[in-house]
Amino acid sequence: MKVLVKADGLGKRFTSRPDEARRLNLANIAFGRSRCAAMWALRNVSFEVEAGEMMGIVGANGAGKSTLLRLLGGIGKPSTGILQMNGRIGALLDLGGGFQGDLTGKENSILSAVVAGLLKHEAIEILPEIIRFAEMEEFIDAPVRTYSTGMLMRLAFSVAVHTSPEIMLVDEYLAVGDLAFQAKCNARITKLREAGCAIVLVSHSMDQIREQCDRALWLRQGMLIACDDAKSVAAHYEQEMRLDSIRRTPENSSRATTSGAELFPKKNRFGSMEMEIADVILHPGHVLGCGDPLGIEIRYRCQSALMSPIFSVSITRPDGSVCLDINTQSAQVPITQVEGYGSIRLNINRLDIAAGSYFVNAGVFEATWSHAYDFHWHAYQLHVEGGSAHKGILAPPCRWEMD
């Protein structure tokens, strides 16, 4: 396959302005610290992306993901190494960030398509398709300063994917619009890949990396840790996050919840405790029938404000095998800031799993999944009652028919 993206020994160094560096050095000398040095956001990163391939980029905040994506998009030049981009680039680094507020959606679409490399008559030609895909027929002649964030994102995405890119640079594209529009985004991305477009995706969602990407690149503090099969890299990255959560868990976090669950640090409770799960309440209770509804209420407390935490719930068997795993990020539940006491509830209309004993696990995580604030594992028992007509995990309503 043709290589469309090639980075060899790529590095990016940022230095302070001379006056700023002078002030910092004087302060460092006064307090007995070493002089400030240039900061490497990326160092010695090498990889290739072939036509039709999707490469994921993972790493904690400050790992260099955004810097790498911007270099690939031509925003700034590398300090070291060689970067080759062999094709027309479509970039989704800041959805709607290039739009001019006083221009209409139609005018901005044409302008953005021309900036992306199309001729004006080509941009006008594909405009109806852009508008239709973005579902913006009703608002396309209004100035974009009147658009909601969601409308801007839909239009920007639509423009980017309709300009025939050979290389797509994407930052969390599944955050665009509602679930129905996200399905359209997925279908369009698949179509681009089938046409030979190489895609580089930055994502904090390991599920997205596993499901969407062929390979993944893992950055830590600007250094390349791994570049391999997406499932393998995602698994190793998640393992490191788990170990980090264990390291952050204070020894004094042993306690019993109001519902009677016993929690022991680094055994069935993990996390930094910047935000704590006070209790997990099952509605209507710990015993229910197969196919019955189940409500899982997570009560939490948070001493200081935290931005965009992610709540997760899983149901597992005693051997740890997973029956259900869901979180607020993948479900697109908008959570901006939390502080003080509160609760969040997951309602399952039908729990169609086989009769038996299970555990409900609950967690709350930092906004980029870098570590757990608090995670309770196998602390809340659930017993499902039912007949013996089913084997395996699923027990959906079903019947036999014979002609």
Image (cartoon, rainbow, N blue to C red):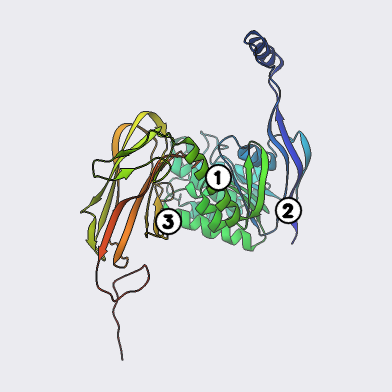
Asked whether the beta carbons under mark 3 and mark 1 sit within 8 Å of each other, the answer is no
Asked if residue 348 shows in the view, the reply is no
Q: What residue is drawn where x is 52% and y is 40%?
A: 244
Q: What residue is drawn where x is 45% and y is 44%?
A: 151
Q: Which of 204 and 267 is in front in this view?
A: 267
Q: Is mark 3 on a helix, strand or loop?
A: helix
The correct choice, above or below, for 366 with respect to 18 in the image is: below
Q: Earlier in the sequence, mark 3 or mark 1?
A: 3
The correct choice, above or below, for 154 with respect to 223 in the image is: below
Q: Where is residue 343 in the image (x, y as percent from the top left)?
A: 29, 40
Which dot marks residue 180? 3
Q: Where is residue 28 in the image (x, y as percent from the top left)?
A: 65, 13
Measured Cα–Cα span from mark 1 to mark 2: 31 Å
Task: Please state which amino acid type lies under the numbered disc 3.
Answer: Ala
Q: Which of 260 and 219 is in front in this view?
A: 260
Which dot marks residue 240? 1
Which dot marks residue 4? 2
Q: Mark 3 vs mark 1: give the one in front.
A: 1
Task: Please state which amino acid type lies under the numbered disc 2.
Answer: Leu
Q: Position of residue 278 (x, y in %)?
A: 30, 38
- Image quadrant occupied by the N terminus: bottom right
